[in-house]
Image (tube, rainbow, N blue to C red):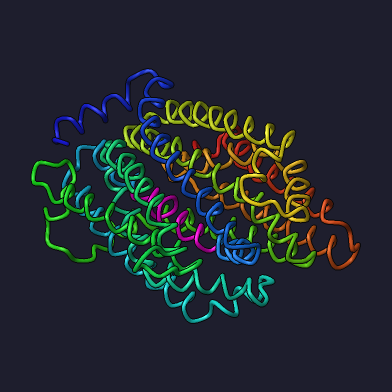
């Protein structure tokens, strides 16, 4: 993409009609992330053929694998998109390229932290979440492969964030679609084996994820090394730059804390559900997997929201930035709410895709009956989280995530250890935590938190 085309896209974000511009920017993201949605469901389907222990094991790893994804793509990635968009909106093209370099440094450091933590302490972490026996073995098999290649995941998502910050939503989306198709072939090959290729079980799904992400990262790296691009990784020498690092981290660190807290919430819920047995853990893992599919939908619109809000805030158009946030939040809430309502009324539409185990189906259906109706609040909170990154206002998204975690900790402990309530009571606590999460951020923006 030429610098002139990038400037044209900036002007459209500043002056073109809101909803058409939002949909134009979000559509390729949503299409690409629809492919990610298929991959998330497909992994569950493939591992469901391995057995209930594999499903339970992957349920243990999911909060941490999604934490890495959300931090790299949503936390640091979103802050990178916002910083690059603000710089380009202000006509600071060289700073945009330097910011891209700083984001790569940050990604490398955080990838190393994930690798050390999960390779060194994975057994203790998953055991503390309720993993036992074969389920724990499956969790470790998947986790050890995935997190040994953490740098691949981080570089893929940071590079995509840089490209989106320059206004190009199409390339990362096309790569998501292409690599998803590759994963559909490679994943079962590595899980089950074929001919001379040995079956790796759960580890094969993780290996496939790393391979397809490496392909995507390589293509975007070549793209950003082009000399006619709006952002060029080679424009200036590679060295840490304190002010530019702070420009990313002042938004990226609190933005990364929000998915840390959100996934801690899921890990806490997983641990409480695990007290009801392996069938409950597997059923919850399958049902809650739907929430991880809602995240890419919100992300598809959210990356467009981040870029639009950041560009408008950088240009001093705060009122338009707020209107962008409400438009995007309303669209995402409507989509996620509709999906939640359908699965609440007919949970078999989702659960039957993954397992035929009657006990697992029962727990998963009960979860969706109760929690599905609150997915509109979950989607609203996620969309406003991305919009808040663009505005550089992350206190209330962090407060919403903290409120969600507090409700799960207190309510879950009461359900399991004091009242010894059935699993449905715990599911009601989870549903209420989603309502608090979305409402907190929305009320804060409505009361003017971005303009104070």
Q: Position of residue 169 (x, y in %)?
A: 31, 37
Q: Determine which quarter of the picture holds residue 105.
A: bottom left
For the point 40% across and 32% down, which residue is it? Answer: 26
**Quick check: 350 left or right of 154?**
right
Count of labels in the image: 0
Question: Which sits in the foreground, 208 or 424?
Answer: 208
For the point 62% across and 49% down, which residue is it? Answer: 400
**Quick check: 202 left or right of 210?**
right
The magenta segment is: 64-80
Relative vertical location of residue 195 with respect to residue 17 in this rendering, above or below = below
For the point 33% across and 55% down, which residue is it? Answer: 212
Q: Residue furthest left?
A: 227
| Quarter of the figure with the N terminus | top left
> Secondary structure of the magenta portion, mostly?
helix
Relative vertical location of residue 434 with respect to residue 451 in this rendering, above or below = below
Residue 86 sits inside the magenta stretch: no
For the point 66% across and 70% down, which residue is it? Answer: 129
Question: Which sits in the foreground, 141 or 302?
Answer: 141
Q: Residue furthest front?
A: 195
Residue 78 sits inside the magenta stretch: yes
Q: Position of residue 343 (x, y in %)?
A: 68, 37
Q: Residue furthest right?
A: 419
């Amino acid at each position: 993409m030429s610098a002139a085309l990038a400037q044209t896209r900036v002007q459209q974000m500043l002056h073109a009609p809101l909803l058409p511009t939002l949909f134009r920017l979000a559509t390729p993201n949503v299409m690409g992330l629809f492919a990610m949605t298929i991959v998330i469901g497909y992994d569950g389907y493939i591992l469901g053929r391995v057995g209930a222990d594999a499903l339970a094991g992957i349920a243990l790893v999911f909060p941490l694998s999604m934490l890495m994804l959300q931090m790299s793509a949503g936390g640091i990635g979103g802050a990178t998109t916002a910083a690059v968009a603000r710089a380009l909106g202000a006509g600071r093209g060289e700073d945009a390229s330097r910011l891209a370099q700083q984001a790569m440094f940050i990604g490398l450091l955080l990838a190393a932290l994930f690798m050390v933590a999960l390779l060194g302490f994975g057994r203790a972490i998953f055991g503390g979440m309720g993993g036992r026996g074969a389920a724990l073995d499956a969790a470790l098999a998947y986790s050890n492969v995935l997190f040994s290649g953490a740098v691949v995941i981080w570089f893929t998502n940071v590079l995509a964030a840089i490209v989106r910050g320059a206004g190009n939503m199409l390339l990362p989306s096309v790569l998501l679609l292409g690599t998803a198709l590759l994963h559909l072939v490679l994943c079962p090959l590595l899980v089950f084996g074929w001919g001379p290729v040995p079956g790796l079980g759960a580890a094969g799904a993780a290996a496939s994820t790393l391979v397809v992400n490496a392909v995507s990262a390589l293509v975007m790296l070549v793209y950003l090394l082009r000399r006619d691009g709006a952002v060029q990784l080679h424009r200036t020498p590679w060295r840490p730059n304190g002010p530019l690092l702070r420009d990313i981290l002042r938004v990226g660190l609190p933005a990364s804390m929000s998915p840390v807290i959100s996934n801690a919430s899921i890990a806490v819920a997983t641990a409480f559900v695990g007290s009801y047995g392996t069938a409950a853990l597997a059923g919850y893992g399958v049902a809650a997997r739907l929430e991880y599919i809602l995240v890419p939908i919100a992300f598809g619109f959210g990356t467009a929201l981040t870029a639009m809000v950041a560009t408008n805030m950088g240009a001093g158009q705060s009122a338009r930035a707020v209107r962008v946030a409400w438009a995007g939040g309303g669209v995402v809430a409507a989509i996620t709410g509709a999906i939640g309502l359908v699965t609440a009324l007919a949970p078999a539409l989702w659960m039957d895709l993954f397992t035929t185990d009657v006990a697992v189906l029962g727990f998963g259906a009960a979860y969706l009956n109760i929690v599905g109706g609150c997915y509109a609040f979950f989607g609203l909170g996620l969309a406003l989280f991305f919009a808040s990154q663009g505005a550089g206002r992350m206190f209330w998204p962090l407060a919403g995530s903290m409120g969600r975690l507090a409700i799960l900790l207190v309510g879950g402990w009461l359900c399991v250890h004091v009242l010894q309530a059935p699993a449905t009571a715990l599911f009601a606590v989870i549903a209420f935590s989603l309502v608090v999460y979305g409402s907190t951020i929305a009320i804060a923006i409505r009361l003017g938190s971005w303009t104070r």
